[in-house]
Image: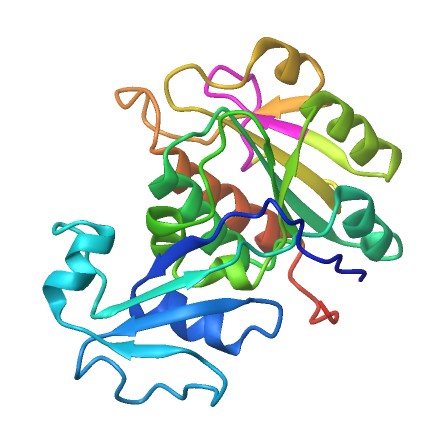
Amino acid sequence: MAHHNLKKESKDILLFGRHPIELALKNPRRTILELFYTKDALSGLTLPPTIKAKCVDRPFLDSLVGRDTIHQGLVARVLPLTQPTLDEVLKKLKDKETALIMILDQITDPHNVGAILRSAVAFDADAVLVPEAGAPVEAGTLAKSASGALELIPFIRVSNLIRAMEKLKQADFWCIGLDGYAKDSIAGAKLPKRCAFVMGSEGDGMRRLTQENCDYSVKLPMNPVIESLNVSNAAALTLYEFRRQHPATGEADS
């Protein structure tokens, strides 16, 4: 897959926490500008000789990311990853019989987006798609919640979600919305082998136009006393059900 040079206007961002930084260090595509660490935090971590690393005290790290942030003594200043385009991902998936993409519409909470990225990696999804407007930045809280998943799965921002859904359909994907008011349960649905699941925000769900552009919608089978699950939990169950019907085959994800 082609990876383009970072644009000059790319802003450096902060990653924190042991697991996100461990995977960032192992990712050849990640540019780490500077690593700050407390005395004991480096045990078991292998630092490339080229990395600029500085031993600091905890108050210094707290001043970078906030006192209430669990940084585990590690904070890195990095460049955002250069993500593939949707066209590049679709080209890679062209001959894959089973393919799985998550589309997040209006999900702005970085904890939720991070948790969904983590589940997407756990269940072998091929990419996570978000609209450029309103999606949280790929740093700090999102990266910590993703627990390293940002290094492992394409996280694609698109300027027009409807156009992206049209491209997916042209590439033989079914766009399936998750909607608590849908008639059919995902448990009884025979899911297509190439799915793009569309998740909306907890409060408002999908935008009307997004919903209208889904091929159909399904709901999770659950007790009506609870109106909706946290969207990251709903995404994990959706991914699980897809993989229950279409187990990952171990196809190379290079």
Relative to 96, 252 lies left or right: left
The quarter of the picture where residue 198 lies is: top right
Residue at x 35% of width, y 78% of height: 53
Quarter of the figure that contains the C terminus: bottom right
Determine if the magenta segment contains residue 41.
no
Quarter of the figure that contains the N terminus: bottom right
**Residue 222 against residue 84 in the figure, above or below:** above
Q: Residue furthest front?
A: 8
Relative to 167, 231 lies left or right: left
Relative to 83, 174 lies left or right: right
Q: Foreground: 226 or 26?
A: 26
- Locate residue 128, reporting x and y percent: 60, 45
**Residue 30 against residue 237 in the figure, above or below:** below
Assign the magenta stretch its main secondary structure.
loop
Residue at x 85% of width, y 39% of height: 172
Question: Would residue 190 be visible to someone looking at this image?
Answer: no
Determine if the magenta segment contains residue 180.
yes
- Locate residue 68, reporting x and y percent: 13, 50
Relative to 164, 56 lies left or right: left
Q: Foreground: 152 or 213?
A: 152
Query: Magenta residues?
Result: 176-187
Question: Would residue 68 be visible to someone looking at this image?
Answer: yes
The colour scheme used here is: rainbow
- Locate residue 35, reporting x and y percent: 36, 72
